[in-house]
Amino acid sequence: MQKNLIREENNMKIGLVGSSGGHLTHLYMLKPTWEKYDRFWVTFDKEDARSMLKDEQMYSCYYPTNRNLKNLIKNTFVAWKVLRKEKPDILISSGAAVAVPFFYLGKLMGKKLIYIEVFDRVDKPTLTGRLVYPIVDEFIVQWEEQLKVYPKSKNFGSIF
Protein backbone atom coordinates (compact mmCIF):
# COMPACT_ATOMS: atom_id res chain seq x y z
CA MET A 1 0.00 0.00 0.00
CA GLN A 2 1.51 3.28 -1.07
CA LYS A 3 0.24 5.64 1.61
CA ASN A 4 -0.02 5.40 5.36
CA LEU A 5 -3.58 4.85 6.59
CA ILE A 6 -3.21 6.70 9.87
CA ARG A 7 -1.46 9.76 11.20
CA GLU A 8 1.22 9.37 13.84
CA GLU A 9 -0.13 9.77 17.36
CA ASN A 10 1.29 8.59 20.65
CA ASN A 11 -0.60 6.02 22.70
CA MET A 12 -3.09 5.27 19.93
CA LYS A 13 -4.88 1.92 19.98
CA ILE A 14 -6.05 0.16 16.83
CA GLY A 15 -8.70 -2.52 16.45
CA LEU A 16 -8.23 -4.72 13.38
CA VAL A 17 -11.47 -6.50 12.50
CA GLY A 18 -11.91 -9.06 9.76
CA SER A 19 -12.92 -12.53 8.76
CA SER A 20 -10.21 -15.15 8.68
CA GLY A 21 -8.72 -16.12 5.33
CA GLY A 22 -8.15 -13.42 2.71
CA HIS A 23 -9.62 -10.56 4.74
CA LEU A 24 -7.29 -11.32 7.64
CA THR A 25 -4.35 -11.67 5.25
CA HIS A 26 -5.11 -8.23 3.79
CA LEU A 27 -5.04 -6.68 7.25
CA TYR A 28 -1.89 -8.53 8.24
CA MET A 29 -0.11 -7.30 5.10
CA LEU A 30 -0.56 -3.77 6.46
CA LYS A 31 1.87 -4.59 9.28
CA PRO A 32 4.07 -1.52 8.60
CA THR A 33 0.99 0.60 9.34
CA TRP A 34 -0.15 -1.06 12.59
CA GLU A 35 2.92 -2.73 14.12
CA LYS A 36 4.08 0.28 16.16
CA TYR A 37 0.71 0.78 17.85
CA ASP A 38 -1.09 -0.92 20.67
CA ARG A 39 -3.63 -3.13 18.92
CA PHE A 40 -6.05 -6.02 19.10
CA TRP A 41 -7.66 -8.27 16.51
CA VAL A 42 -11.17 -9.60 16.05
CA THR A 43 -11.57 -12.57 13.74
CA PHE A 44 -12.86 -16.13 13.53
CA ASP A 45 -11.32 -18.75 15.79
CA LYS A 46 -9.82 -20.76 12.93
CA GLU A 47 -6.41 -22.31 12.40
CA ASP A 48 -5.13 -19.63 10.01
CA ALA A 49 -6.06 -16.86 12.43
CA ARG A 50 -4.61 -18.64 15.47
CA SER A 51 -1.38 -19.28 13.57
CA MET A 52 -1.00 -15.80 12.06
CA LEU A 53 -1.95 -13.99 15.26
CA LYS A 54 -0.27 -16.27 17.80
CA ASP A 55 1.61 -13.36 19.37
CA GLU A 56 -1.24 -10.85 19.10
CA GLN A 57 -4.24 -10.00 21.29
CA MET A 58 -7.15 -11.73 19.53
CA TYR A 59 -10.86 -11.86 20.21
CA SER A 60 -13.01 -14.48 18.55
CA CYS A 61 -16.27 -13.70 16.82
CA TYR A 62 -19.03 -15.91 15.44
CA TYR A 63 -19.25 -17.29 11.91
CA PRO A 64 -20.65 -17.69 9.38
CA THR A 65 -21.47 -13.99 9.17
CA ASN A 66 -22.83 -13.35 5.68
CA ARG A 67 -26.58 -13.06 5.80
CA ASN A 68 -26.71 -14.79 9.18
CA LEU A 69 -28.93 -12.74 11.51
CA LYS A 70 -28.24 -14.91 14.57
CA ASN A 71 -24.47 -14.38 14.31
CA LEU A 72 -24.92 -10.69 13.51
CA ILE A 73 -26.71 -10.32 16.84
CA LYS A 74 -24.09 -12.41 18.67
CA ASN A 75 -21.27 -10.40 17.07
CA THR A 76 -22.98 -7.17 18.07
CA PHE A 77 -22.69 -8.28 21.70
CA VAL A 78 -19.05 -9.26 21.11
CA ALA A 79 -18.42 -5.83 19.57
CA TRP A 80 -20.04 -4.07 22.52
CA LYS A 81 -17.90 -5.97 25.04
CA VAL A 82 -14.63 -5.70 23.12
CA LEU A 83 -15.01 -2.00 22.25
CA ARG A 84 -15.87 -1.09 25.83
CA LYS A 85 -12.92 -3.08 27.18
CA GLU A 86 -10.26 -2.11 24.62
CA LYS A 87 -11.32 1.50 23.91
CA PRO A 88 -9.63 1.75 20.48
CA ASP A 89 -9.08 5.06 18.75
CA ILE A 90 -9.35 3.54 15.28
CA LEU A 91 -11.02 0.49 13.77
CA ILE A 92 -9.64 -0.88 10.52
CA SER A 93 -11.30 -3.61 8.48
CA SER A 94 -11.16 -5.21 5.07
CA GLY A 95 -14.36 -7.14 5.67
CA ALA A 96 -16.34 -9.10 5.69
CA ALA A 97 -19.61 -8.92 7.60
CA VAL A 98 -18.05 -9.05 11.09
CA ALA A 99 -16.99 -5.44 10.45
CA VAL A 100 -20.59 -4.22 10.39
CA PRO A 101 -21.46 -4.42 14.12
CA PHE A 102 -17.99 -3.22 15.13
CA PHE A 103 -18.17 -0.23 12.79
CA TYR A 104 -21.71 0.85 13.71
CA LEU A 105 -21.05 0.58 17.44
CA GLY A 106 -17.63 2.17 16.93
CA LYS A 107 -19.27 5.09 15.13
CA LEU A 108 -21.69 5.56 18.05
CA MET A 109 -18.68 5.56 20.39
CA GLY A 110 -16.83 8.19 18.34
CA LYS A 111 -14.12 5.94 16.92
CA LYS A 112 -12.35 6.64 13.63
CA LEU A 113 -13.31 4.02 11.02
CA ILE A 114 -11.17 2.92 8.08
CA TYR A 115 -12.51 0.35 5.64
CA ILE A 116 -10.50 -1.25 2.84
CA GLU A 117 -12.59 -2.74 0.04
CA VAL A 118 -11.44 -6.15 -1.11
CA PHE A 119 -8.99 -6.56 -3.95
CA ASP A 120 -11.03 -9.03 -5.98
CA ARG A 121 -14.17 -6.91 -6.39
CA VAL A 122 -13.40 -4.37 -9.10
CA ASP A 123 -16.65 -3.06 -10.57
CA LYS A 124 -19.37 -3.89 -8.00
CA PRO A 125 -19.68 -3.14 -4.30
CA THR A 126 -19.52 -5.84 -1.67
CA LEU A 127 -22.41 -6.14 0.79
CA THR A 128 -20.17 -5.07 3.68
CA GLY A 129 -18.76 -2.19 1.64
CA ARG A 130 -22.26 -0.91 0.92
CA LEU A 131 -23.26 -1.18 4.58
CA VAL A 132 -20.27 0.66 6.05
CA TYR A 133 -19.58 3.18 3.26
CA PRO A 134 -22.02 5.80 4.63
CA ILE A 135 -20.44 5.88 8.11
CA VAL A 136 -16.68 5.43 7.63
CA ASP A 137 -14.09 8.19 7.96
CA GLU A 138 -11.90 6.70 5.23
CA PHE A 139 -12.99 4.24 2.54
CA ILE A 140 -9.98 2.81 0.73
CA VAL A 141 -10.11 1.05 -2.63
CA GLN A 142 -7.38 -0.82 -4.48
CA TRP A 143 -8.47 -0.24 -8.09
CA GLU A 144 -9.13 2.92 -10.07
CA GLU A 145 -12.40 1.34 -11.29
CA GLN A 146 -13.67 1.10 -7.71
CA LEU A 147 -13.76 4.91 -7.50
CA LYS A 148 -16.85 4.78 -9.76
CA VAL A 149 -18.56 2.45 -7.29
CA TYR A 150 -17.49 4.43 -4.21
CA PRO A 151 -17.07 8.08 -5.31
CA LYS A 152 -15.89 9.36 -1.88
CA SER A 153 -13.22 6.69 -1.56
CA LYS A 154 -9.45 6.97 -1.93
CA ASN A 155 -7.42 4.70 -4.18
CA PHE A 156 -4.25 3.64 -2.36
CA GLY A 157 -3.45 0.91 -4.88
CA SER A 158 -2.97 -2.77 -4.22
CA ILE A 159 -2.03 -4.11 -0.81
CA PHE A 160 -0.17 -6.96 -2.53
Image (cartoon, rainbow, N blue to C red):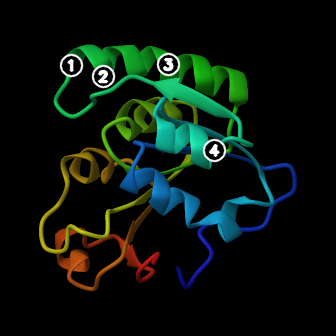
Q: Which mark is residue 53?
A: 4
> What type is the residue that disc 2 sits on?
Leu
Q: Helix or strand or loop: what does disc 4 sit on?
A: loop
In screen coordinates, is 151 left or right of 16? left
Q: Which residue is drawn at the image coordinates 48% and 29% (left, top)?
A: 45
Q: Which residue is mark 1?
A: 69
Query: Distance between the Cα atoms at labels 1 and 3?
Result: 14 Å
Q: Helix or strand or loop: what does disc 3 sit on?
A: helix
> What type is the residue that disc 4 sits on?
Leu
Of residue 98 and residue 12, the one placed in the foreground of this image is: 98
Q: Which residue is mark 2?
A: 72
Q: Nearer the viewer, mark 2 or mark 4?
A: 4
Query: Distance between the Cα atoms at labels 1 and 4?
Result: 27 Å
Query: Distance between the Cα atoms at labels 1 and 2?
Result: 5 Å
Query: Distance between the Cα atoms at labels 4 and 3?
Result: 19 Å
Q: In the rendered structure, are the residues bearing label 2 and label 3 in contact, judged by CB atoms less than 8 Å apart? A: no
Q: Position of residue 150 (x, y in %)?
A: 24, 68
Q: In the rendered structure, are the residues bearing label 2 and label 4 in contact, judged by CB atoms less than 8 Å apart? A: no
Q: Helix or strand or loop: what does disc 2 sit on?
A: helix
Q: Which residue is drawn at the image coordinates 32% and 70% (left, top)?
A: 152
Marked residue nearer the N-terminal end (1 or 3) = 1
